Structures are given as C-alpha cells and as structure tokens.
Amino acid sequence: MPCSLIHEHRLSSLGFTPIAGIDEAGRGPLAGPVVVGGVILPPDFELHGLNDSKKLTPKARERLYAEITGNFEIRWTSIAIPSQEIDRLNILGATHSGMRAVIEQLSPRPAHALIDGLPVPNFPCPQTALVGGDGLSLSIAAASIIAKVERDLIMLENDRLYPEYGFAKHKGYPTREHFAKLRAHGPCPIHRRSFAPVAQAEPW
C-alpha cells in the first residue's frame, strides 16, 4: 500500500479532527538525543516524494523538510529527549515521553494520533498505532522527516563540540568507526551510558 492519507480520511469520517502523525528518530544510536516529530496536515494534502524518511536521500529529506516547515497550513513541532533522560527512563520510556509531549505542544490539540510502531501507554489522546506507519501515512511520514532532519542538525552541532568522534558522519549510530572512536577516547557527555557498548568503554 503506498503512503497516503487513507488512515487520516477514515478517522476524519468518524469525526476525529485534527489528526496528528507522530514518529521518532534516533532510538538506535549510542549518542545524542531521540527526537520526536508531530505533524498535522491539511485535508487532501499532497507533496511529491513524501515518504518514510529512511527511504529518502539526505538531499530529498532536506527539501521535504523545508517544504513542510515552510507551509503555513501545516502544524508541526518536535522534541529532543537528551541522552541523560534516555539513561534515566530507558530508550523506550524516553521515546514515549517525547510522543506524549509532542501531542501537548501541537496547536490545535489533536483529536487523534497516528503513531509509527506500537501503542503508547497513558497517551493524552486517542491513538492508532501503525507498524511501518511512516510508509503508510503521509502524516507519519512528514513527522519522520521532521524528526530525522532535526536530529541530524543536532548531531552536526555535536560534531563541532566533540570533533574527535565523527558525529557528522555516523550521527551517533553504532558503526565500526564510532566503536573505534569510543574505544580510543571513551564516552563524551552526549553518549548514552545505559547502552552496553558505551558502558563497556567507560574508563575504570
């Protein structure tokens, strides 16, 4: 099934409006925040090439990000949960916390949320969880692009702060190069110390 507004239209027909798409970027990395994006698209929205951010080139993501954030009809927000909060809550708890917070920040307040993945407990509005939703719902796809581009921008800034780790290249993901830098230098302040490879690299 191609990425579309079919789920949004079904919910609208049941009286739910507005509808937000929610997605995250950065659950897997060893460093940096997890970023959650939330987007409310106008009815019958169209944007050529809009799809799951993981299926797009960086250049395509940046173009779509500019078009989404520059469209006055689109309501969007994002939240970055830092590595210290990830260590405190665990990555799933931190992601869920960000998803709840995004709903609270969006205006107008969503009547329903389409979430990529599995249901989120104690959610502040009705929700529909869609596994692979960023490739099914245009609202979730837009949220995935917001989250991914904003997280990449944060990691570029972290690369300037901690240039020895190569964050501009691997964005904190567990690549061979990142493991080598982690072994050579030990963790820096944005590393997730609750993640086993980082804990194992802590100096004794």
Image (spheres, grey):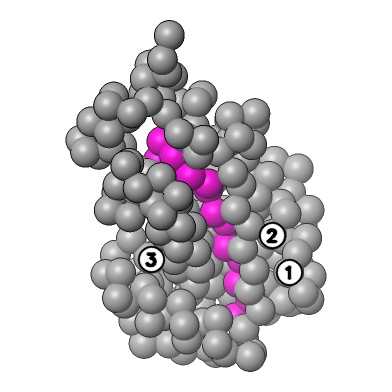
Q: Which residue is mark 2?
A: 102
* Of the image marks 3 and 2, the number of the one nearer the N terminus: 3
Q: Which residues are magenta?
A: 28-41
Amino acid, disc 3? Asp
Q: Can you identify the residue that label 3 sits on?
A: 52
Q: Secondary structure at mark 3?
A: loop
Residue drawn where x is 36% and y is 87% of the image: 48
> Picture coordinates of residue 75 (x, y %)?
66, 79
Left or right of residue 146, residue 156 in this image: left
Q: Quadrant of the C terminus?
A: top left
Numbered circle sitting on residue 106: 1
Q: Is residue 57 left or right of residue 155?
A: left
Foreground mark, 3 or 1, reads 1
Indicate which label's residue lies in the foreground, 3 or 2: 2
Residue 11 appears in view: no
Of residues 99 and 154, the one nearer the viewer is 154
Left or right of residue 169: residue 7: right
SS label for mark 2: helix
Query: Left or right: where does residue 82 sit relative to residue 165?
Result: right
Give me the C-alpha separation between circle 3 and circle 2: 19 Å
The image quarter in which residue 10 lies: bottom right
